[in-house]
Amino acid sequence: MDIIKEIIQRAQQQRQRIVLPEGTEPRTIQAADRAIENGTADVILLGKREEILGLANSLNLKNILKANIINPETSEQHEMFAEKLVELRKKKGMTIEEARKLINNPLYFGCMMIKLGFADGQLAGARDATANVLRPALQIIKTEPGITCVSGGMLLITNAKEYGEEGLLVVGDVAVTPVPDAGQLAQIAICTARTAQAVAGIQDPRVAMLSFSTKGSASHEVVNKVIEATRKAHEMAPELKLDGELQADAAIVPEVAQLKAPGSEVAGKANVLIVPCLEVGNISYKLVQRLGHAKAIGPILQGIARPVNDLSRGCSVDDVYTMIAITADQAIHLKEQEAK
Ligand code: ACO
């Protein structure tokens, strides 16, 4: 079965409450309608009720009537959320006036819903820029235990079945931290491996820490960073199959791995690729997507205590629907982890 179908099925089995702050955005509302119809999530749409229902009516969407629609500005929770936000951000000098203003912003309102247990995850970005989607999540929801660096994993489904997990590769970070230090890069590796397991269904992640050098073939301070990140990642997760520094060909091509990194349990068969910085990740996944006709799913934000995901502004209704299911799936997984 394909992995998107599997993700949707898992979401349908334990329905999660997913906030969509861009309630008046046409692709978002169409995907929300489908999610309600298919039982993929309990959808919470933020925005003015009459605007949302007017748009739904003009698009002939009947299921939106079953959505929970909340206008942050007039919500009875507005003042309580503002007060809680002041509590959370008092060390940063936030005043109640600033908090009231921020709570009017659906991206902040949604994150407060999650923080206070009224919702399980959030998805936005069809209209808002990445940084605006990320900031409230980083400020309010914060990171999961043991992690300080949020990052974004990308599922790349390629037709090159000889590489990765039958053509599936998970790459990180493609979305958040522009220049990670060695410790952050180690965390990105561990979180991307978790995404590979939890979302992509890869049972046995094999993580390659990528560079332009393989096992000392080149020396430079940026290579040293990857070597140090590899060491730290081993320390943090000794059970994880992870190796570096590796060039991309040594990571995924068995014949090249034989020559450049013989004996490695990862080289030649990596299914999780960790890039040294955001530029490399973002550029390379887009090139693989366009030139290699790969399907790119994500970014799937990882390391946040509750799932908040970001859409590309060029997304389709299908993309939004898939990301609703992924956000729900992550929420289920995070809750299961906590219960252990
Ligand atoms: N992990 C965890 N927390 C973080 C991270 C991180 N990677 N980065 C910032 N934070 C926290 C900070 O500690 C801070 O918390 P605090 O206010 O409680 O102290 C809060 O987030 C805000 O941090 P700032 O550095 O002040 O926020 P800023 O808005 O400058 O930057 C952001 C954060 C938005 C993540 C920024 O790094 C960014 O814009 N990254 C790139 C996003 C992007 O454009 N990606 C590419 C497009 S996505 C795509 O194409 C798939």
Image: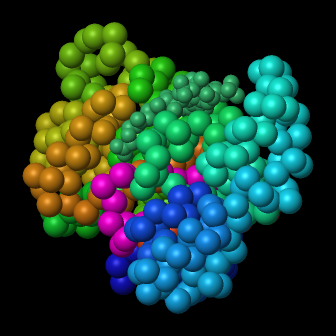
Q: Which of 220 and 131 is in front in this view?
A: 131
Q: Quadrant of the C terminus?
A: bottom right
Q: Can residue 34 be seen in this view?
A: no
Q: Indicate yes or no whether the magenta region holds residue 318.
A: yes
- x and y percentages locating residue 242 in the rendered image: 43, 41
Q: Which of 144 and 68 is in front in this view?
A: 68
3 relative position to 288: left or right: right
Quarter occupied by residue 21: bottom right
Q: Which residue is drawn at 23% across and 41% down?
A: 284
Q: Can residue 135 be seen in this view?
A: yes
Q: Give the range drawn in magenta.
A: 305-320
Q: Which of 106 and 286 is in front in this view?
A: 106
Q: Which residue is drawn at 65% across and 85% down?
A: 66
The way the protein has been coloured in the rendering is: rainbow
Q: Which of 163 and 43 is in front in this view?
A: 43
Ligand 1's quadrant: top right
Q: Which residue is drawn at 17% across and 41% down?
A: 249
325 relative position to 101: left or right: left
Quarter occupied by residue 303: top right
278 relative position to 35: left or right: left
Count numbered badges in the picture. Answer: 0
- x and y percentages locating residue 199 in the rendered image: 49, 64
- x and y percentages locating residue 28 in the rendered image: 46, 67
Q: In which quarter of the image is the N terminus?
A: bottom left
Q: Residue at x 37, y 52 (%)?
A: 312
- x and y percentages locating residue 150 in the rendered image: 56, 38
Q: Indicate yes or no whether the magenta region holds residue 101.
A: no
